[in-house]
Amino acid sequence: MVDEVVVSILDRIAKRHGPQQADKSNPELVIVQMQRRDIREIMPIENAVYPKPWTEKVFQDEIEMMYRNQRLYLVARVGRELVGYCGLLFSNDDAHITNIAVSPRWQNCGVATELMLELAWEARERGFQALTLEVRHTNHVAQELYRRFGFAPAGIRKKYYENTDDAIVMWCQDIQSDAFAERIREIARSRP
């Protein structure tokens, strides 16, 4: 069953649009399902981009839940280099983006957009009605990316991050609509 889940996700990613192009010297960006062996490459990115990073154990537990079809985690690679990753938690009618991170040297190269495209398509294909996430109130670049995908602020979680920073809760409703599908197709068409 695990192999079937892995193959079906990889098949869907490949069928949607094949390997994507990153901007640095135009190398190929490939997005695949996260594996346990990726954790050692993920940790330097996790430590660089989050003030309170997840531990290796948290990633191991999340991957285990992925094998039970309760989560989806993807990694983005340029050549052999792991340049970013993201996660999706499955709930009743909605999917929650648990994290999205890009290596500092690959930020602003379109990697986060490609990861978001994969999460959006995957949530649609799994039949979810909405996407949700939290974002640090000071992370305006990420907020702009999420707004581009149709996310709107729905509330604030006070002192959510490290008991000091507020989180903006954002929702993207009705992701099964034709309008949402067209929005993500347009984002995909507009990539460099």
Image (cartoon, rainbow, N blue to C red):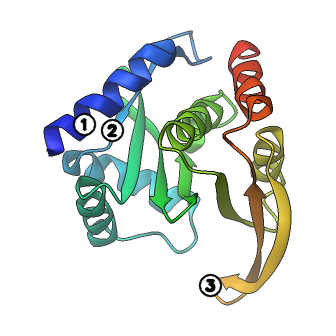
Disc 3 packing (10 Å; few <14; some 14–19; many ≥20): few
Of discs 3 and 2, which sits in the foreground?
Answer: 2
Q: Indicate the position of residue 126 as horizontal and vertical percent values.
A: 47, 43
Task: Answer whether residue 192 is visible to the viewer in this image.
Answer: no
> Identity of the amino acid at label 2?
Gln
Q: Is residue 171 left or right of residue 58?
A: right
Q: Is residue 74 left or right of residue 185?
A: left
Q: Is residue 63 left or right of residue 143?
A: left
Q: Quadrant of the C terminus?
A: top right
Q: Indicate the position of residue 97 as horizontal and vertical percent values.
A: 57, 56
Disc 2 element: strand
The residue nearer to you, when weighing 75 against 27, is 75
Of discs 1 and 2, which sits in the foreground?
Answer: 1
Residue 33 - label: 2
> Identity of the amino acid at label 3?
Glu
Residue displayed at 58% across by 71% down: 51
Q: Of label 3 and label 1, which has the lower sequence position? A: 1
Query: Do callouts 1 and 2 mark residues in contact (Cβ within 8 Å)?
Result: yes
Disc 1 element: helix
Residue 133 - label: none
Residue displayed at 46% across by 60% down: 90
Residue displayed at 47% across by 52% down: 87
Q: Is residue 47 above or below residue 157?
A: above
Disc 3 element: loop
Q: Indicate the position of residue 144 as horizontal and vertical percent values.
A: 83, 46
Q: Is residue 171 above or below residue 24?
A: below
Residue 6 - label: 1
Q: Give the labeled residue for mark 3.
A: 162
Q: Is residue 17 left or right of residue 43?
A: right
The residue nearer to you, when weighing 8 against 166, is 8
